[in-house]
Amino acid sequence: MRQRKVRGIVFGAGAMLASAALLAGCGTVGDTGTGTTGSAGGDEKYEIVLVSKVEGISWFEAMSSGVAEFNSDYSDEVNARQTGPDTGDPAKQVQIVEDLIAQGVDAIVVVPNDPQSIAPVLQKARDAGIVVVTHEAPALVGTESIDYDVESFDNVVFGEGLAEDLAQQMGGKGQFLGMVGSLTSETHMAWYNAAVAYFGENYPDIEVVVDQPYEDNNDDAQARANAEEIVRAYPDLAGYIGTSVSAGSNFAQVLKEKNLTSVNTSVLSLPSVAGPYLEEGWLGFAQTWSPADAGYVSALVALKVLKGEEITTGTDLEREGYESVVVDGKLITGDAILELRKGTFAPGSYPF
């Protein structure tokens, strides 16, 4: 197992985290500062737009607050905003990027639903002189489609963290399966596959009972339908990993409604979503990172590229967990894993 450096969240009197509103080189970098609104050294501001996977869900609402904070902090230099599709359809993301290219923005930051399908239009943006930064898309690091990809942590380490805690809950044995936001989501599959590999190497008595994880498309209704099917189809299930917020919360809700205490859980979530389920015992463990911080840092990387500033290992990107990033080619990696456990929440104290 790779070494994990994590930050726990502790809430309660005198121990609340700040609001999520306080929030993320080497390689070939495209021409910068050539959009219609921005100009290096001029009076006009750089136009930076973050394209989320899907708008209207808690994760990307939190990310939007980070973009807004970045816009406020750098208001003399940028106009920064977030947009995104109304569903997790990769084609809708592609169309939004096409529209932004036509508008001549200076930088596009994308959290791709499908990194491979969006790569050609990102290349088109760079060819037009637009800076392109991605988050949760390390597969694009070796391509000319991006200037940088920003990762909040090592994805294998994140997946192994979910697996280790779940294995401890399961006593190292029993049936396991998982649910991801999308089978084309690079990071979700990286975490899930890392967890499965970790079980194989360290816990041979944990049985993976599905060939591939369930998929919820980051949709609560689909996640709930999947959860109901899972508990019906696998009565001996002992362990579950969910890599979307919907996958975690809806599975916990189904367990609660059925008063099913035999399934152990380890999920991606948000403090505000996971908190009640952790305290009541319907979730055993959750990991996360601040989407607001990720949005802030990714937009800051775009600004630095536009201004011609070098980003190297050790660069401080101004948010906790990104104070000394590691840069490997076009890959920027922070150390921003947050662990969420029972006993660390007080009512009303969730930071995001």
Image: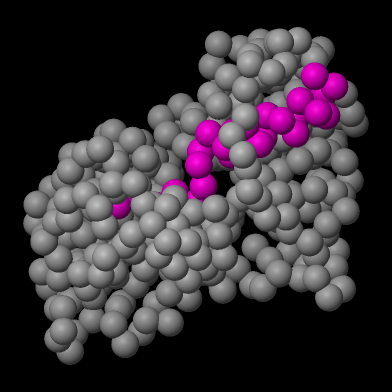
Residue at 9% across / 56% down in the picture? 128
Q: Which residues are magenta?
A: 148-172
Residue 265 picture quarter: top right
Task: Please identify the quadrant where the N terminus is shown.
Answer: top right
Closer-to-camera residue (277/142): 142
Residue 137 appears at what percent x and percent y? 37, 42
Counting from the top left corner in percent of width and height, residue 73 is at: 43, 82
- Closer-to-camera residue (48/250): 48
Instruction: Decide which of 308, 64 is in the foreground and name it.
Output: 308
**Residue 205 drawn at (x, y percent):** 76, 10
Q: Is residue 293 above or below residue 80?
A: above
Color theme of the render: one colour
Which residue occupies 14% across, 78% down?
39
Q: Residue at x 72, y 16 (%)?
A: 203
Q: Is residue 118 above or below residue 39?
A: above
Q: Where on the picture, by quarter, is residue 174? A: top right
201 in magenta: no
Q: Is residue 23 left or right of residue 271?
A: left
